[in-house]
Image (tube, coloured by chain):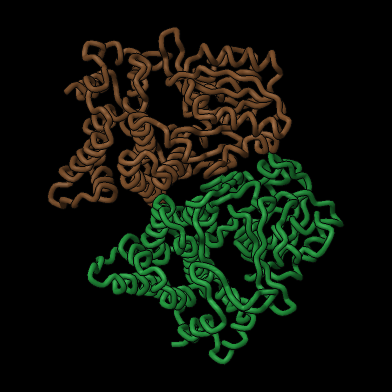
Chain colours: A green, B brown
Amino acid sequence: MQNFSFYSPTFFEFGKDSETKAGELVKRFGGSKVLIHYGGGSVVRSGLLYRVKKSLEKEGIDYVELGGVKPNPRSGLVYEGIDLCKKENVDFVLAVGGGSTIDSSKAIAAGVVYNGDFWDFYMGKRIEEALPVGTILTIAAAGSEGSPDSVITKEEGMFKRGATGDAIRPKFSILNPALTQTLPPYQTAAGITDIMAHLHERYLTNTKEVEVTDRLIEALLLTMVHEGPRVIEDPNNYEARANIMWAGMMAHNNCVGVGRSQDWNSHDIEHELSALYDCAHGAGLAVTMPAVFKYVYKHDVMRFAKLAVRVWGCQMDFDNPESTALAGIACLENYLRSIGMPLSFKELGAKEEDIPKLVESLCYGNGRDGNIYGFVTLNKDDCEKIYKLMVR
Amino acid sequence: MQNFSFYSPTFFEFGKDSETKAGELVKRFGGSKVLIHYGGGSVVRSGLLYRVKKSLEKEGIDYVELGGVKPNPRSGLVYEGIDLCKKENVDFVLAVGGGSTIDSSKAIAAGVVYNGDFWDFYMGKRIEEALPVGTILTIAAAGSEGSPDSVITKEEGMFKRGATGDAIRPKFSILNPALTQTLPPYQTAAGITDIMAHLHERYLTNTKEVEVTDRLIEALLLTMVHEGPRVIEDPNNYEARANIMWAGMMAHNNCVGVGRSQDWNSHDIEHELSALYDCAHGAGLAVTMPAVFKYVYKHDVMRFAKLAVRVWGCQMDFDNPESTALAGIACLENYLRSIGMPLSFKELGAKEEDIPKLVESLCYGNGRDGNIYGFVTLNKDDCEKIYKLMVR
């Protein structure tokens, strides 16, 4: 196991009606003038935004609003949010929505207190300071509610890049599984896929002797295998939603990923797809993951075989572990298909002729050196072959 | 799943040589005058105390010392520590040791800022305020390095009771697995048993639909099943020590126990044993757990069968799930035996004739109403029968 630091100081309020505590929690964590940041009309239509405002008003907390966050959140709205916060002397950013809204809120919170272009952070500068951020989560997916990370897409060039820093870890996150019951099945499934991707990215490691985190990752994958189909079959299944919601947080606050090298190649490869086609990140990952895994599994056949046996219940083929490894990847594909996710370029709306453009942006865009680094180092040629595996 | 709050703001520094960061971390979390609290001579002999002092001195941090913490830490030393901190204007308590030292440090930290007898907290008053506490852990066991709990024994009456409150959660905990390599095998095994008990106490729930926490608890138990024997066989196995150390923290900071009722009857029943005989808490738990489980398993046969199948690899007997449940408990006994733990009163040094005294203290001591409450409510008669199961 590698040496590591771990710090997850977010306060989680989990369960039915937990959003009614928003005002109390903003107050507890020092907010007096709040930016409520959200996406489209669904939080308005559902009455959630109204309830949140009531909760803030009850505590005498002032607020301004900024809606309009889109999936794959853009830098343009971040600049707008930073200006608004400065003008209105906002001292707390409250995200009401999913990972995109939370990531956009984090970017705004960091940008407000920074003398420079917030995009610097997405070019690799660590975020050391930010306004406090709170979240009210409406989809189990990104894990941004408990993470120090944010991913934003820059309109000029459509670069999708990440930034990180403990300063943007949410002070509190409100997780009410009932709020996710109104999600369309496709979005629910994309969220499930994103959670599973966060687990696979951590599972694919080159660090030896990491049984505790291996087992914890497997535990969360097993939970998703069990609960995913239940929630697709019955969107109102509160209990399945609740199990998925906690799994989604645990999958990404990194308590199951400490002390080991991680992969994140699937995420990098996918980011180009959602940046170019504006597809759901989770759907892009459903297409990406099996292709990546088929390309790299020979790097550590036993690791893929272990995943197949422990998570997918495959029988170990002791004479030919490769067949077990491949059987596990096939189980993942079947699972993703069963919850309604795409598995190919065609189903995602991606085009084979765009592959050179995707590869160029992936390997050289935004200052990259021609490779992407993870479980296996992949060069331009490897990445091209992986995208081609998605054309089927 | 039940509604819950979860908050674990401890900063963990994990790995080789991590104790050299003590000074830096005390400074980061606001300490300028430290009480270094520790147990016996082992931290002196190993040079750990010296290294910690050097690290404080390097940051210009002043300190006083109080050694002498014993296993099953006593109230007497807590009073002494409180007086010392007041006299010396201490503003930070640094525990260097295991669960006993950490629990004693937490009690001192709470007592210093409280106008009254610190024992009030151990009679049920919630701890709302305390000096900041940091820890340098020397045994993987109690999980106190990441928990809001403390257990102290009051000399008058030998009552062993717990207190809780977010204020006593450590600000930071330094976890260097190498520091645990010098532990005698018996203490190592007692620590392993304590970790496994924390997991069982959480696993035994009456809450339905808690797959995510079930799976996470099983993951940590599977880790212990794998790593425990390796570290007993080779005390210098750093990797096995590291896996156990992180499992021990995760087992007890409650991220795997949220949203579900928990048991804790085994702990209550054991506390009487270690209070009366001053045995190692983990050794007491090795004797207690199998007896409790044999007494209560019929309350939920399927839960015990699940544990047997998923953790111990037992075959499910679909015609007679009870036999699977019992097979799992037998596996636990075999495991505890294999790592050198006692399984009976005799091996522990407990006496059958003391049972009435144990039961009296357990069920009526320190304000109790005649029952203990958990997975199953146990009255005086039940507790007597459970203690008798340990006589064999």
> For the point 64% across and 50% down, which residue is it?
A170
Residue extending farthest to the left is B319
Residue A191 visible to an observer of this rendering: no
| B35 or B118, nearer to the observer | B35
| B353 or B385, nearer to the observer | B353
| B342 or A135, nearer to the observer | B342
Locate residue A225: give its quadrant. Answer: bottom left
> For the point 73% across and 31% down, which residue is it?
B60
Image-based side of B316 in relation to A148, left or right:
left
Can you say whether B188 is above or below A38 in the image? above
Locate residue B360: give its quadrant. Answer: top left
Image-based side of A156 in relation to B304, left or right:
right
Can you say whether A359 is above or below B115 in the image? below
* Residue A360 percent location from the top left of the image: 63, 83
* Residue A184 percent location from the top left of the image: 51, 69
Residue extending farthest to the right is A87
* Residue B273 percent location from the top left of the image: 33, 19
> For the point 49% across and 43% down, which residue is it?
B3
* Residue B313 percent location from the top left of the image: 24, 51
Can you say whether B34 is above or below B335 in the image? above
> For the point 68% across and 53% down, which residue is it?
A168
Q: Quadrant of the C terminus of chain A?
A: bottom left
| A41 or B317, nearer to the observer | B317
Residue extending farthest to the top is B156
Can you say whether B312 is above or below B163 in the image? below
